[in-house]
Amino acid sequence: MPEPFSFADANASLDEAEIVLYGVPYDRTASFRAGARLGPNAIREASWNFETYLMDHGRSLADVRVCDLGNTDEYGPVKDMVEGVRRISHDLVKRGKVPIVLGGEHSIAPASVMGFDDDIGVLGIDAHLDFRDEYLGERFSHACSARRIADHVGVDDVVYMGVRSFSAEEAEDLERLGLTYVSAFDIHEKGPDRAVERALKAVDQEKIYLTIDLDGVDPAYAPAVGNPEPFGLTPLHVKSIIDALGPRLVGMDLNEVAPGWDHGQTALLAARLVREAIVAIGSRK
Ligand SMILES: [Mn+2]
């Protein structure tokens, strides 16, 4: 693989790219398993495992123009990360690109979403509701991602799927503020297509941003995450959700891969899901 290595098959220049990847090596609000700062490069390395041709799509990633910008600076205070990431996503959107952000912890998601105008729906995959107004004194904590995203696009335009954990305070707030979510149990029972249908109906927006906290997937498949939670989604559930949303995606991030806890399978799944998203987005043209 080329040095410094980029995501496999990301061979386009910034000018010619339709999709632009960048990594945010940030995990300073981690509360359990730290190490997501090493996620972007682990995901890039894993991406070289796969064929350029995606059998089930009958398409080659070589046909989609993707650029990998590498990683951002290693930000200190969370407000610096939020402003830095917001600005990068904003610049890419203004240039007509679809950003795909590699985390880093989930606090990178609201930062990236803030780079968009507020006329988007934001769907999430996450074990957790992330609807706290602050956590351990930090409003931009990884545990507040849905809450900060709701601040930007409105609470009606956020739906997290695969949820199986929230606090009593979040339960109260979601009732009071009218947040929709789809539980992991619903998806096991009724399937991912129904989840997407419900989520899209709730947000009622044409343009969709997808934030994937990999802890939405069961720890059996994705053990190396900041806050593993049993009863999760299968990798195929997430693939189905990406396939269904692909044509409408204007941006995405994938976060919380902490390679220090991995035997490689979490980073491999993350890389494969990013490849699925690239081909799903690239298929619409
Ligand atoms: Mn989570």
Image (spheres, rainbow, N blue to C red):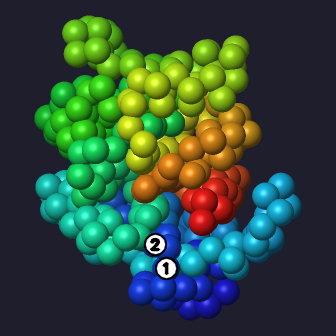
Classify mark 2: helix, strand or loop: strand
Of the residues shown, which amino acid type is indicated by label 1? Ala
Compared to residue 240, the image places residue 191 above or below, namely: above
Tag 2: Cα neighbours inside 10 Å, few (<14), some, or many (≥20)? many
Quadrant of the image occupied by residue 101: bottom left
Tag 1: Cα neighbours inside 10 Å, few (<14), some, or many (≥20)? some
Percent position of residue 6, x then y: 55, 80
Disc 2 to disc 1, C-alpha distance? 7 Å
Would residue 72 be seen by someone viewing this image from the given angle? no
Percent position of residue 84, x then y: 21, 66
Of the residues shown, which amino acid type is indicated by label 2? Val
Query: Residue at (66%, 46%) from the top-left corner?
Result: 243
Res 17 label: 1
Q: Which residue is mark 2?
A: 20
Name the quadrant of the N terminus.
bottom right
Classify mark 1: helix, strand or loop: loop
Compared to residue 245, the image places residue 220 above or below, namely: above
- Judged left or right of residue 157, residue 160 is right
Query: Residue at (34%, 49%) from the top-left corner?
Result: 109
Tag in front: 2 or 1: 1
Query: Residue at (17%, 61%) from the top-left corner?
Result: 83
- Judged left or right of residue 72, residue 191 is right
Task: Compare residues 189 and 167 and report the one nearer the observer.
Answer: 189
Name the quadrant of the C terminus.
bottom right
Percent position of residue 90, x then y: 26, 65
Percent position of residue 2, x then y: 61, 90
Do tag 2 and tag 1 residues touch (Cβ < 8 Å)?
yes
Compared to residue 242, the image places residue 158 above or below, namely: above
